[in-house]
Image: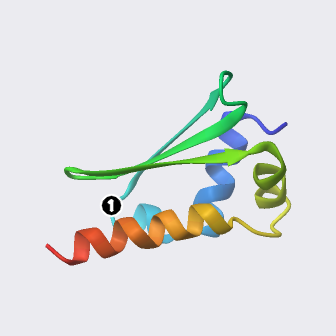
Amino acid sequence: MPSKEELCNKIKEVFPEIGSCGIDLKVDYDDSEKAWVVDLKKGDHELKTYLEEPEAQQCMEGKQCVSLGLQIGQLRKNIEEL
């Protein structure tokens, strides 16, 4: 299992727009859900998504981060509509 910092850094590597468009990123492991909680926030907009272990591992290996990519796209869409 990756560390919080490793996963956070990998997400920023895969989705460089997170920092450049001012999206704040927070990553924590939720023991009750047995999944990583990825919290994306910009201003008053916030979206959380859960990455289960297999998907987090695939993301770390550079294979895919599908649900996270969808969440980032949705957050950007919500912000641009303002």
Task: Choose between 29 and 11: the one closer to the eye.
Answer: 29
Quarter that holds the N terminus: top right
Residue nearest the viewer, comparing 11 with 69 = 69
Q: Is residue 17 above or below residue 9?
A: below
* Residue drawn at the location 69% of the way across and 65% of the way down: 65
Quadrant of res 35: top right
Does residue 72 appear left or right of residue 6 in this picture? Answer: left
Vertical relation: 40 (above or below) 73: above
**Is 54 located above or below residue 27 in the figure?**
below
Q: Is mark 1 on a helix, strand or loop?
A: loop
Residue 55 picture location, percent across and down? 78, 55
Residue at x-position 37% and y-position 58%: 23
What is the residue that sits farthest to the front in this orientation? Answer: 33
**Quadrant where the image shows the C terminus:** bottom left
Question: What is the image's colouring?
Answer: rainbow
Query: How many dots with numbers?
Result: 1
Question: What percent of the width, then of the height, locates residue 43?
Answer: 21, 52
Q: In this view, does 9 lie above or below 71?
A: above
Label 1 neighbourhood size at 10 Å, few (<14), some (14-19), many (20+)? few
For disc 1, the marked residue is 22
Residue 28 lies in quadrant: top right
Whether residue 27 sits left or right of residue 25 in the image: it is: right
Of the residues shown, which amino acid type is indicated by label 1? Gly
25 displayed left or right of 10: left
Q: Residue at x 43, y 61 (%)?
A: 19
Residue 22 location, x and y as percent?
33, 61
- Residue that protrudes farthest toward the top in the picture: 32
